[in-house]
Image (spheres, helix red, strand yellow):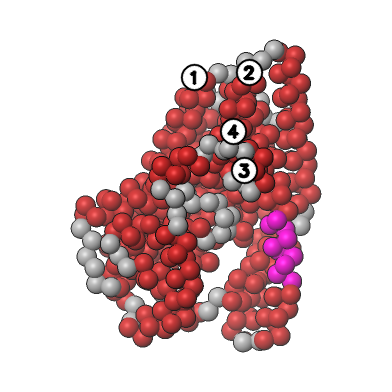
Amino acid sequence: MKLYTKISIGLVAGATAGIVVNIAGWEGGGNVLATIEPFGLGWIRLIRMIVVPLVVASLVVGAASLGDLRTLGRVGGKTVAYYLATTSVAVSIGLVLSNVIKPGRGLSVESQQALQAEYGTQAAGNIELGNQAPSVVQLLLSMIPDNPVGAAANADMLPLILFSILFGVAATMIREDRRRAVLGVFEAINDISMVMIHWVMTLAPYAVFVLIAAVTARFGFEILESLLWYTGTVVLGLALHAFGTFSLILRFLARVNPVEFFRRIRNAQLLGFSTSSSSATLPVSMQIAEENLGISKKISSFVLPLGATVNMDGTALYQGVAVMFIAQVFGIELSVMQQLMVVLTATLASIGAAGVPSAGIITLTIVLSQAGVPDTGIALILGVDRILDMLRTSVNLTGDLTGATFIARTEGENIVLDATTAPTVAEGSPAQ
C-alpha cells in the first residue's frame, strides 16, 4: 500500500474518531486522545530534528552549484519576486471574497459575546506577542546572524539561510581540492538526512491519526456554526488560490500538467495539513521536489527553504479575510485605499511569519493595527484558527513547490510531468 494511501486512511480515521468523541461528549475518549497525542507531537519533533542539518547542507551545496554571485542573484531575485507576487494575489483574493460575501454581517451579538468571553484571554496574549514583533529594520538586521551556531540551535531560519548561502558561494572561491572535500561532507549530510526522512515517514500514518483525532475532538461544532460564513470564505479563498492561481502558473508559466503536479505533491499537502507547519514539512517537500517533480537539487535546495520561511500565501489570504471579517463585525467600513494597504501590510507581515503552527494569528495583529481595526476582534476567530491553520499551511506548501517548479523552468530545466512517465530528473537531481 502506498504511503499516500496509508496517510489518507490515518487522516480519515483520526477525523472520524475525533468527531465521534466530540459529538458524544465522551470524556473517557477525550482522555485517551490526550494520552496518545504526545506520540504525534513527538513525530513532528522528529521531522524538525532533521530540518536544520538538511537546510544547511542543501543550501551550501545548492549555492555552490549555482556557480557565482551573478547566478545566485538572478535565481534569488526571481524567487523573491515570485513569492511577493503570489502573496499579493492571495491577499487580494481574500479581500474580494470578503467584500462580496461579507462574512462579518452574519455573526450575531450573542455569538460575539460568547466568543469574546471564551477566547478573550488567549487573544490578549497573542496581541501582546504581536506588539513585540520586530520592525522592518530589526527584521533585516536579524537576518544577519552574529552566531550561526546559535541560529541553528534556535532554529532561526532566516539568518541560517543567509549564512548557508554565503558559505556555499564562498566555497566556490577556494582551491578545487579543498572545495570538493568540503562540499563532499555537506552532500553526505544531505544524503543522510534523506535516509532519516524515510525512517520518520514510516510513522506518518499513525502520527497523522493521533494529531487529527486530537484536533477534531477539541473542535466545537457550535463554534464552527457561529463562524460558518467566515470559515467558508477563508476555505473558498484558499481553494481558489491553490487550484486557480497555482494551476494557471503551472500551466502557462511552468508549462507542466497541474493535475499531475498536484497528484505528485499530495504527500506534502497532507503532512502540511496534519502538522500545520511549513518548516516541519520542509524535508518532505524537498524530497518530493527532487524525486517526484524532477527539480534539480540546486534549485530545490535554494527555493524551498526560503519559501518555508518567507512564502506564506495561505497565511496572507487568511489575514485579508480576517481583517475584513472583524471590521464588518464592528461596523467599520474600509476604503479601497485602506484595503490596498492591507494587501501591502499582509504581504510584508507574512514574510516575518515563522513556519510554525498559528504564527499567522500573531502577525495578524500588525495588519489589524495598520487598518485601524480593533485587535481585540482576534478573540472572535480563535475558535476555528487551528483548522484553518492546517488548510493554509497546505496552501503555503503548494505555493513553495509551484514556485520551485516555475523557477526551475526559467533556469532551463526540462520538467515533464504526465501520468504515464516517471518525472524527468533535471541535472543535479538524485537518481531515481
Residue at 36% across, 46% down: 88
Q: Earlier in the sequence, mark 4 or mark 2?
A: 4
Observer-side mark, 1 or 3, equals 3
Considering the image in quadrants, where does the N terminus appear?
Answer: bottom right
Q: CA distance from mark 4 to mark 1?
A: 18 Å
Query: N-terminal of the two: label 4 or label 1?
Result: 1
Q: Earlier in the sequence, mark 3 or mark 4?
A: 3
Q: Are marks 3 and 4 in contact (CB under 8 Å)?
A: yes
- Quarter holding the C terminus is top right
In this picture, residue 200 sits left or right of residue 224 = right
Mark 4 Cα within 10 Å, few/some/many (few <14, many 20+)?
many
To which residue does mark 2 refer? 172
How many C-alpha atoms fall within 10 Å of the one at disc 1: few (<14), some, or many (≥20)? few
Q: Is residue 415 left or right of residue 130?
A: right
The image's mark for residue 151 is: 3
Q: Amino acid at mark 3?
A: Ala
Residue 86 painted magenta: no
**Above or below — where is 290 with respect to 132?**
above
Residue 43 in the magenta stretch? The answer is: yes
